[in-house]
Image: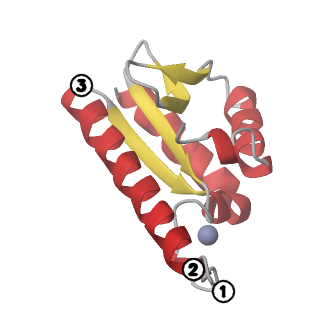
């Protein structure tokens, strides 16, 4: 459920291509129990990359994402639940022994090389 609205976004695909070019091999949308999936997973060393959609996860750099109109409260509640569920998923992964790296879509869009390096280093050290 968590990633369905933002699966296979352009930043996520760009990051996967960069990781592949750096020689890493990964699984995408790996399900590890429950309904949530890890966007980019390295199951051998238990490193998981979660890509947060700026809209669905209320990115702080995109405060412009506020809602007006009669459904504003409903939307805000829905987004708050999405964030809560997602953080809960991250905690469960850590408890299961995963190292979790989490990036915003907009961060990836502007820094794909730096983020790729960070993941490569984490995977190599894990
Ligand atoms: Zn953002």
* Of the pair 62 and 123, the residue shown nearer to us: 62
Mark 2 touching mark 1, by CB under 8 A?
A: yes
> How many numbered marks does the figure carry?
3
How packed mark 3 is, by other alpha carbons closer than 10 Å (few <14, some 14-19, many 20 or more), is: few
* Image quarter hosting the N terminus: top right
Residue with the mark numbered 1: 69
Instruction: Give percent across and percent down for residue 121.
Output: 46, 38
Q: Residue at x 41, y 19 (%)?
A: 32
SS under mark 3: loop
Residue with the mark numbered 3: 97
Residue with the mark numbered 2: 72
* Of the pair 59 and 79, the residue shown nearer to us: 79
- Mark 2 or 3, nearer chain start: 2
Q: Quadrant of residue 106?
A: bottom right
Q: Quadrant of residue 124?
A: top left
How packed mark 1 is, by other alpha carbons closer than 10 Å (few <14, some 14-19, many 20 or more), is: few
- In this rendering, is residue 28 above or below 44? below
In the rendered structure, the answer to whether residue 10 lies left or right of residue 105 reads right
**What separation in Å lies between label 3 and label 1 (alpha carbons)?**
43 Å
Q: Which mark is residue 92?
A: none
Q: Is mark 2 within 8 Å of ligand 1?
A: no
């Amino acid at each position: 459920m968590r990633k369905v609205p933002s699966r296979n976004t352009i930043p996520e695909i760009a990051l996967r291509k960069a990781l592949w070019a750096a020689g890493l091999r990964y699984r995408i949308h790996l399900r590890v129990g429950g309904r949530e999936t890890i966007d980019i997973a390295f199951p051998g060393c238990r490193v998981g990359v979660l890509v947060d959609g700026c809209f669905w996860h209320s990115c702080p750099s995109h405060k412009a994402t506020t809602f007006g109109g009669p459904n504003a409260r409903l939307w805000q509640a829905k987004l708050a639940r999405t964030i809560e569920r997602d953080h809960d998923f991250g905690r469960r992964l850590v408890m299961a022994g995963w190292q979790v790296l989490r990036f915003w879509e907009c961060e990836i869009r502007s820094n794909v090389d730096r983020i790729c390096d960070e993941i490569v280093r984490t995977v190599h050290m894990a």
